[in-house]
């Protein structure tokens, strides 16, 4: 289907979603609905094994919530819709990578945090943060929950209460991002990671993502039970057999997702 707010592409086993509302790529209800539609479609497509989300233009990954819709019925609906879509990303059964090519502020930061991996361009113009406090509001798409889980309570409170914006080196040092990319290399780095993930066993990836996501929300005792269920499921797959045979035969495994 045609998308008005996104550029949707595929390169072999990698799906690429580009927020296409430059220069700031603000997120409104239409963006959220289109994003969810693509994710739902690719969730069923076995050929897509990893996904990259980035922003169009050179300035912004996303400035977050589209303030032009604030106070309107559309704006009100987008608040709950944003939580739904970002939760969909966080619980997605395939790895999702945020390629942060410009400022990721407010909802843009929350979108990046909902992804499993974040690669951030090392540039003075590229920062991440939750500046809602400076507008007298709070994050509404999971920022108060995901940020402390990623960077710890103290640093998260500093960023949330002061509206602190941080660059790529600091984001890496506090665990907010996966890696730093140098100018001209961001999408190459993101695609390299996506292709590496796409070669792994799809069902095993799905089970690991599920076990980690659900396990973080419960006790260790309950978490290991989730892990055991996943291990039992994986042991019956053809990919598990392929992994064992490839090891014995000293060759690279070829996983099919079965």
Image (cartoon, rainbow, N blue to C red):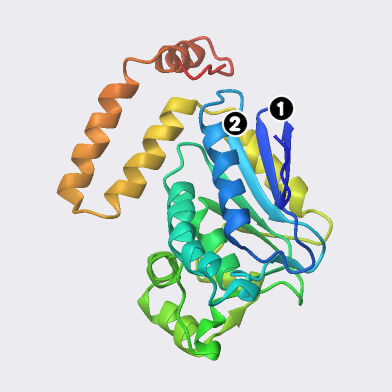
Identify the image quadrant of the C terminus: top left
Q: Which mark is residue 201?
A: none
Q: Is residue 47 visible?
A: yes
| Residue depicted at x 57% and y 41% | 37
Q: How many marks?
A: 2
The one nearer the camera, 87 or 191, is 87
Q: Quadrant of residue 25?
A: bottom right
Identify the image quadrant of the N terminus: top right
Q: Position of residue 250 (x, y in %)?
A: 55, 14
Image height of 9 relative to 182, above or below = above
Q: Position of residue 27 (x, y in %)?
A: 62, 63
Rounded to the nearest angstrom, the CA distance separating label 2 from label 1 is: 10 Å
Mark found first going from the N terminus, 2 or 1:
1
Q: Position of residue 8 (x, y in %)?
A: 72, 41
Q: Is residue 172 visible?
A: no
Which residue is under mark 2?
Answer: 198
Find numbered disc 1 in the image and state the secondary structure of the residue it sits on: loop
Image height of 47 relative to 250, above or below = below
The one nearer the camera, 89 or 153, is 89
Q: Please identify the residue farthest to the left as the structure is shown.
A: 221
Q: Nearer the viewer, mark 2 or mark 1?
A: 1
Find numbered disc 2 in the image and state the secondary structure of the residue it sits on: helix
Residue 99 shown left or right of residue 29 in the figure: right
Residue 54 shown left or right of residue 50 in the figure: right
Which residue is under mark 1?
Answer: 12
Q: Are marks 2 and 1 in contact (CB under 8 Å)?
A: yes
């Amino acid at each position: 289907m045609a998308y008005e707010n996104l550029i949707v592409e595929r390169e072999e086993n990698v799906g690429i979603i580009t927020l296409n509302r430059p220069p700031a790529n603000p997120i409104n209800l239409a963006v959220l609905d289109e994003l969810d539609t693509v994710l739902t479609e690719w969730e069923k497509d076995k050929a897509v094994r990893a996904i990259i989300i980035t922003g169009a233009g050179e300035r912004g990954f996303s400035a977050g919530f589209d303030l032009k819709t604030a106070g309107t019925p559309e704006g009100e609906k987008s608040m709950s819709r944003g939580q739904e879509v970002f939760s969909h990303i966080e619980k997605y059964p395939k790895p999702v990578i945020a390629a942060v090519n410009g400022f990721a502020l407010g909802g843009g930061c929350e979108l990046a945090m909902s992804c499993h991996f974040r690669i951030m361009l090392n540039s003075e113009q590229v920062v991440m943060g939750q500046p809602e406090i400076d507008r007298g509001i709070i994050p509404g798409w999971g920022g108060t929950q995901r940020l402390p889980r990623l960077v710890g309570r103290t640093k998260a409170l500093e960023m949330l209460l002061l509206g602190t914006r941080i660059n790529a080196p600091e984001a890496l040092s506090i665990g907010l991002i996966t890696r730093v990319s140098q100018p001209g290399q961001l999408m190459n780095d993101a695609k390299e990671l996506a292709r590496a993930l796409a070669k792994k066993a799809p069902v095993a990836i799905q089970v690991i993502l599920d076990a980690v996501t659900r396990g973080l929300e419960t006790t260790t005792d309950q978490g290991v039970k989730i892990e055991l269920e996943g291990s039992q499921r994986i042991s019956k797959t053809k990919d598990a057999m392929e992994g064992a045979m490839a090891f014995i035969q000293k060759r690279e495994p070829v996983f099919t997702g079965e």
